[in-house]
Amino acid sequence: MGDEPPGRRWRPAAALAVLVAVTATVGVLIAILQRPATHAPMRSTAVATPTPIALQAPPSLNLSGTWAGLCTGPFNGFCSLTWTQTAHALDGTFVVSSPPDNLHISGNLTGSTISFGAGGVATFTGTVSGSTMSGSYTDIANGKTGSWTVTISA
């Protein structure tokens, strides 16, 4: 040990201290890497995209009131519709002269297309154009069809 240049002496205590510090640091790193996670790992989760709800525009037609005209087929002669309209829903009465009857009806309006029914008696479909409604119907009891045309009463 005597042939080492001055200032470059080997110091066993210092070397031992460096070795202990490095070993301790490596031990701490190993312990950190082996420690279980304190929270669940982040996983990507698919997020459900809400299904858009088709909103129906307010009706551009107001059918509320009394409509009168003629029916042909199983219901024949004078007929009238009296409507109360709430948004697209229709509720009212259907009066026919032959055979004489006064029926409760309900239905809906989509654009200019109307569909309604009289509680198990008949189903009606048609269109509205200005002050006139017309279409066809089916008499449920016998399956026969007919037509109807009515105009709004002033």
Image: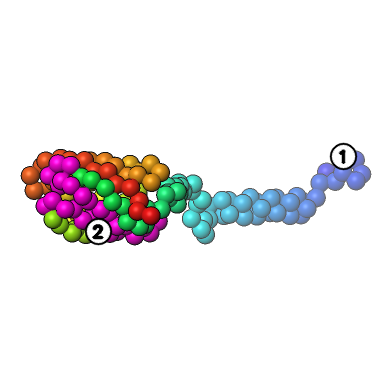
Position of residue 15 measured from the top left corner of the image (x, y, whole percent)? 75, 50
The residues colored magenta run 72-99
Residue reaching furthest to the right? 6
Crowd tier of the residue under label 1, counting other residues whose Cα lies within 10 Å: few below 14, some 14–19, many 20 or above: few
* Residue pictured at 38% horizontal, 55% vertical: 154
Position of residue 150 measured from the top left corner of the image (x, y, whole percent)? 29, 47
On screen, residue 146 versus residue 27, left or right, reads: left
Mark 2 against mark 1, which lies toward the viewer?
2
Q: Identify which residue, 15 or 72, lies in the foreground.
A: 72
The residue under label 2 is 93
Q: Quadrant of the N terminus?
A: top right
On screen, residue 77 versus residue 152, left or right, reads: left
Q: Identify which residue, 150 or 124, lies in the foreground.
A: 150
Q: Assess whether residue 126 is covered by the magenta stretch.
A: no
Query: In terms of secondary structure, what is the magenta stretch mainly?
Result: strand
* Residue pictured at 45% horizontal, 52% vertical: 58
The residue under label 1 is 3
Disc 1 on helix, strand or loop? loop
Q: Identify which residue, 23 or 112, lies in the foreground.
A: 112
* Residue pictured at 51% horizontal, 58% vertical: 39
Please say if 10 is above or below 101: above
Kind of residue at badge 2: Thr
Position of residue 62 measured from the top left corner of the image (x, y, whole percent)? 41, 53
Residue reaching furthest to the left? 142
Can residue 102 be seen?
yes
Kind of residue at badge 1: Asp
Disc 2 on helix, strand or loop? strand
